[in-house]
Amino acid sequence: MILSGHEIEQQLGTNIIIEPFDPSNLNPNSYNLSLHDELMVYEEVVLDMRKANRVRRMTIPQEGFVLHPGQLYLGRTVERTETHNLVPMIEGRSSIGRLGLFVHVTAGFGDVGFCGYWTLEMFAVQPVRIYPGVAICQIFYHDIRGSFTEYASDKYQHNTDIQPSLLFKELGGVSENDPQMKLPFGIEHPY
């Protein structure tokens, strides 16, 4: 079952936390989340699942920023969410999709217990201008049946920023003890 907008509002502060919360973003069965003003792109030509790939940051100016086809852009929501006893999911808004902009290439499914900002995997079918603060996607909530263990991850839980893929942690790639991991993403070692 998907929660109605009224039920989302009823569960605010207990099972659902959305910070900041704006009642005008509440829909009949979802809540609109906004685009933060930062983007991240990978600098590697070939992405390697076993390592922390280099990234570059950019800021979306108030006058907008054009996304180009053939490039994956990582963004994040302005809102931090926290969900307990429910399964959170995000979907692109239909008005955004009709411009040929996909806001989560594959990762719209959240886990019960997730706390943090949503990283958006944005891909444009044709050039499209985006703006900071635009309502980019919507979050909705499903009931969960049966016993469960809340999500706990050393990769993405309680994040405070855009999160590039950390799959390498699962695959035995570059470890956190590697000196490369001590540098901010996007900065290479001089050796």
Image: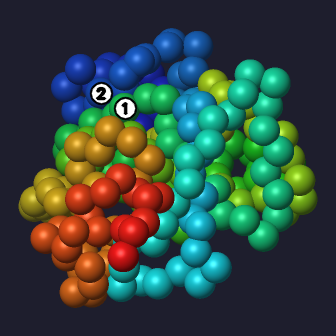
Front-most of residues 38 and 155: 38
- Does residue 180 lie above or below 34 as drawn? below
* Residue found farthest to the right: 126
* Residue found farthest to the top: 23
Residue pictured at 50% horizontal, 37% vertical: 77
- The quarter holding residue 72 reads bottom right
The disc at residue 17 is: 2
Q: Amino acid at mark 1?
A: Arg
175 lies left or right of 119 = left
43 lies left or right of 79 = right
Residue pictured at 13% horizontal, 70% vertical: 177
Instruction: Give the x, y percent position of residue 24.
Output: 58, 13
Instruction: Give the x, y percent position of residue 120.
Output: 54, 51
Indicate the secondary structure of the residue bearing disc 2.
Answer: strand
* Badge nearest the viewer, 1 or 2: 1
The disc at residue 184 is: none
Instruction: Give the x, y percent position of residue 82.
Output: 27, 36
Residue pictured at 36% horizontal, 76% vertical: 191
Q: Amino acid at mark 2?
A: Ile
Crowding around mark 1 (Cα neighbors within 10 Å: few <14, some 14 to 19, many 20+) is some
Q: How many marks?
A: 2
Residue receiving disc 1? 80
Crowding around mark 2 (Cα neighbors within 10 Å: few <14, some 14 to 19, many 20+) is some
Residues at badges 1 and 2 in contact (C-beta under 8 Å)? yes
- The quarter holding residue 93 reads top right
Q: CA distance from mark 1 to mark 2?
A: 8 Å
Residue 43 at least partly seen:
yes
